[in-house]
Image: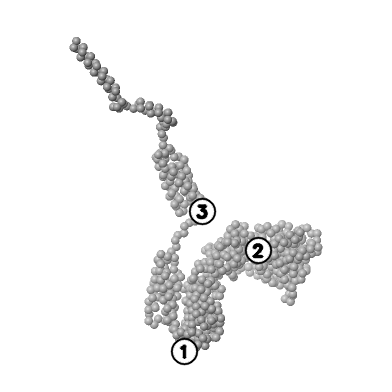
Amino acid sequence: MKRKKIWLTLGIMVSAVSISVTTIPNQREVYAKTEYMQTMSNEKKNISPKEYNRLALEFVKSLKPDTFKTWDQSIAKMTEEEAREIKSFLDQNIIKNEKDDYQKAKKIYEWIMKNIRYARPQDQNVGLRPYDVFKYKVAVCGGYSNLYKAMLNLEGIPSVLVTGNTSAGAHEWNMVYANGKWFFSDSTWGSSDEKWFDYGFEQFAKDHMVLDVQQVFTTDENGVILGFHKGMAVIGVKNGIKTLTVPKKYNGTDVTSVAYTVFDEKYALENIILTEKVTNVDVESQSKMLKSIKVPQENTYYASKDGVLFTKDFSRILMYPFAKEERSFVIPKEVREYDSKETFKTPQLGEILVEEGNKTFSSYDGAIYNKEKTMLLTVPEGKNKIYIPGTVVLDNIALNGKQNLKEVILEDGMKNIPPYTFSGCTGLKKIYIPASVTNIAKESFNAVDLKEVIVCGQRNSEAEKFAKINGMKFEDVKALEIKLKETKEVIAKAKEFEDVDKYTEESVEILRKVINEAEKTVQIEGVTVEELDRVIEKLNTTISAMEEKIEPEKPQVSKEIQRKIEEVNTLLKKAEKYDNTNKYTEESIAVLRKVIKEGKVVVAKENVTVEELDTIIMKLNKSIAEMKEVEIKNPPKDEKTQGNMLQEEQGNVPKTADTSVPGIAGLGGMVSMAIIAFLQKKKR
C-alpha cells in the first residue's frame, strides 16, 4: 500500500514538456564549446549560464522538496502496474538494503548509465514514457531524464525535470534532492562519464544552462502563478484575473520573464502590465482575449505605445494584441520590422497607417507597403474596401484569405493578376480592374463565388473578357470616379471628428485645415487618382492623430484615508448636535462652530493627508468634550420647594397700589378721628 500511495500522488498542473533530441556529446567537443556556451545565453541581456542555474536552483529551494517526491502523470503516463514492476526491480536489483538517499540516487544513476543506450536514427521503440525506456533500454535525453525521475520518485526521492541549452545543443536533465541538498544530475551525459551525477554547481554551469524547470510553480498572494522560464517568470494566473500586473520580485528574486503559457486561452487575460525588470516576453503566440500590453519607460528592453509591444528602440513590433479594440493604428517612423502575416490578425483593425519619416514602410489607403509601393505587405483583417496602386506587383500572399474584403480597386498601371491572388476572399462583391491589366489568371479567384462578384472596368478590356468567360456581371466604370467617391466619403468621416468638446482645439484646428484642402482638391478639374490618394492618406493620418481631451485623474485614496474621512464625517454630525444655545454657552458654541467649519474644509480636500485628518479628529473630540452648559441659579428641586420660594419671593416684592390701599385707609381714619377730637376740645 505504501508503494501504491507513493506513485499515485500525482501533480495537477498540465503543461507540455519541451523535449529536444541531442546526440551524446564527445567530451572533447564539450570542452571545445565551453567558451561558446558562456556567451550564447542572450547577447542582449548578458546573463551567464551560471546565473541562470543559480536562479533556477534558488527557486526550487524556496519550495518544499516533498512536493516533488511523486511522479507527475502530466509529464508522461505510467500505470499502477508499471510503477509496481519498476519499484520491485529497484528494490531487488538496484537499491537492495541501501538506506541513504544520496547513495540510492547514485545507484539508480549508475544503473541508467550502464543499461540505457542513446537512440540512433534506425532504432525502434524510442519513447519518453518511463516504462518504455525501462523496458526497451533505448532513449533520447527526454526519456533518460523521465526514467531517472520516475525511479527516484518511486524511492521517495524528490526530483524535477530541467530543459535548457548545453555546449552540445538543446538538452534535458534533472535536479535531485538528497541528504538535505539539491544538485544537478545529467543521466544522459552519464553514458559517457559518470561525473555528471553530481559534478558540482561550478563545473556543471560551464556546460549547462537552465532555461525551464518543468512542472515547478507557486502562486503569490495576488493570484500570479510563478515558475522558472528564462529566469524567474510569470507562467499563468488564477481563474478570473483579467489584468496581469507582473510582480517585481518573488522571494527576493527579480521577476524578469513572461512565459508563453501566460498567453494560453485558459487564462483569458485582457491586459498585461510589465515592470522595468522584465527582460523576456515570449511573443510567439498570444491569447485572442488580449487587449493591451503596457511597459514602463524605465524598462530597457521593451516599450509600448497604444497597448502595442515594441522593442525598446521601436525598431520592431513584437505583439499587436488580438482583441485591441481600436479600428486604426499608426506604425511609428522607427519601425523596421514586423511579421507581415501574423502581427495584425485582429479582426477589429480596419486601417494601418505609417508615420511620416519611416524609411522601410509606407501606407496607402490603410494598408502597408514597402517604401517604394511595389509590394503589398499587409491588409488589415477588418478592411472591407481597398485601393491598390498600379505600381504594385501582386502576389498570392497579401490578399489571400481576406474574408472581410468586399471591394477592391486596382489602379491604372497594374499589368498582371497572378494565380491565387484573391484566393479565399469569400466576401468579395466588386473588383475594379484597369485597362492596363493584360493578364488575369484563371485561378486568381480560387474559392470565390464568381457569380457574386461584379467586375468593373472599361469596355473591350481584359476585365470585360474575363467577366464574360466566367459568367460575371460587368460594369463600365472609370477608376477616377471611384476614387472621387471614396475621397468624399473620407471627408465626411473626418468632419465627424470636429468636436472641440472631445478633442483638443489644436488637433481640431489641424483637422479643419486638412478638410479644407481636401474639399478644394476634389473640385479641381482634371484631378488625378494619385492626388486624391494623397488627400485620403493625409485625412486618415490626421484623424488617427486626433488628441482627446484628458481630464485630470483623481488621485486614488488609500483605505486608511477613506476610514479617517468617514470618522471625521461621523464626528461632524455628532458635533452639530451640540450647537444648541439654550443648553451650551455662547463661548463654547463659537469654538465648536469654528472647528466644524475647519473639519468640512479638510474632508473636501482632494489631496488630504492622514496627518490633517488626525488633527481635525483631535480638535473635534476636544471641542465636544469641552462644551459648557448654561448655568441655572438655585434650580427648583420639588413642588414644595417651589411654593416656599414663591412665598419668599412675594414677601420681598415692593407693595403696589393694590396691596397698600387698606393701610392708607386706616391711617386716614386715625387722622380724621384725631382732628375731630381736637375740634371738640376747642369748643369746650
Give the residue number, with chain letter if any, for mark 3: 558
Instruction: Tell which of 618 and 304 is nearer to you.
Output: 618
Quadrant of the rendered image containing residue 62: bottom right
Image location (x, y in percent) of residue 420: 55, 82
Which residue type does callout 2 highlight? Met
Q: Nearer the viewer, mark 3 or mark 1?
A: 1
- The total of numbered circles placed on residues is 3
Give the residue at mark 2.
13
Q: Nearer the viewer, residue 618 or 211?
A: 618
At label 3, which amino acid type do we have? Ser
| Residue furthest top as drawn | 684
Rounded to the nearest angstrom, the CA distance separating label 2 from label 3 is 37 Å
Amino acid type, label 1: Asn
Whether residues under marks 2 and 3 lie with C-beta atoms below 8 angstroms apart, the answer is no
Front position among marks 2 and 3? 2
Q: Residue at x 18, y 12 (%)?
A: 683
The mark nearer the N terminus, 2 or 3, is: 2
Q: CA distance from mark 3 to mark 1?
A: 76 Å
Residue 34 in view, yes or no: no
| Residue 366, x across and y down, in percent | 48, 75
> Label 1's element?
loop
Q: Dot 3, how many residues are within 10 Å of its Cα: few (below 14), some (14-19), or many (20+)?
A: few
Q: Which of the two residues, 426 or 333, is positioned nearer the viewer here?
A: 426
Residue identified by numbered label 1: 460
Q: In the shown orientation, is residue 98 left or right of residue 430?
A: right
Q: Earlier in the sequence, mark 2 or mark 1?
A: 2
